[in-house]
Image (cartoon, rainbow, N blue to C red):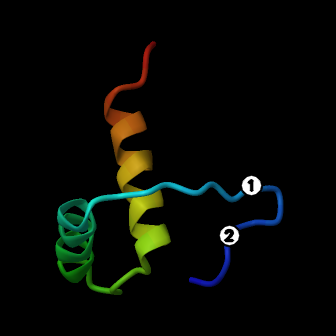
Amino acid sequence: MGRPKLDTHPITVRLSAEFIQMIDDARKKETDLPTRPEMMRRMMEDWFEKNAQD
């Protein structure tokens, strides 16, 4: 998996313990157990794919 591409920018987000737990629960369902940042990227990519404006 590794670090994201060099043409990316870090962001800082504060999340509640409950929200972090939901992310961790989703991570455990993945076969490769992604990191929290990777899981958040996957979740956002999925959301954008489902909500893309044509």
Residue 23 picture quarter:
bottom left
- At horizontal 43% and vertical 15% (from top left) the residue drawn is 53
The percent position of residue 31, horizontal first and vertical second, equals 27, 85
The total of numbered circles placed on residues is: 2
Pointer 1: what residue? Answer: 9
User: Which residue occupies the extreme right position in the image?
Assistant: 6
Q: Quadrant of the N terminus?
A: bottom right
Q: Is residue 51 left or right of residue 22?
A: right
User: Which residue occupies the extreme top position in the image?
Assistant: 54
Which amino acid lies under the numbered mark 1 shown in the image of this protein?
A: His
The front one of 32 and 41 is: 41
Which amino acid lies under the numbered mark 2 shown in the image of this protein?
A: Pro
Q: Earlier in the sequence, mark 1 or mark 2?
A: 2
Q: Secondary structure at mark 1?
A: loop
Pointer 2: what residue? Answer: 4
Q: Is residue 47 left or right of residue 10?
A: left
For the residues bearing labels 1 and 2, Cβ distance under 8 angstroms: no
Q: Secondary structure at mark 2?
A: loop
Q: Quadrant of the C terminus?
A: top left
Q: Badge 2 local density, few (<14 within 10 Å), some, or many (20+)?
A: few
- At horizontal 31% and vertical 33% (from top left) the residue drawn is 50
The front one of 36 and 16 is: 16
The front one of 36 and 31 is: 36
Residue 22 picture quarter:
bottom left
The percent position of residue 9, horizontal first and vertical second, equals 74, 55
The percent position of residue 20, horizontal first and vertical second, equals 28, 68
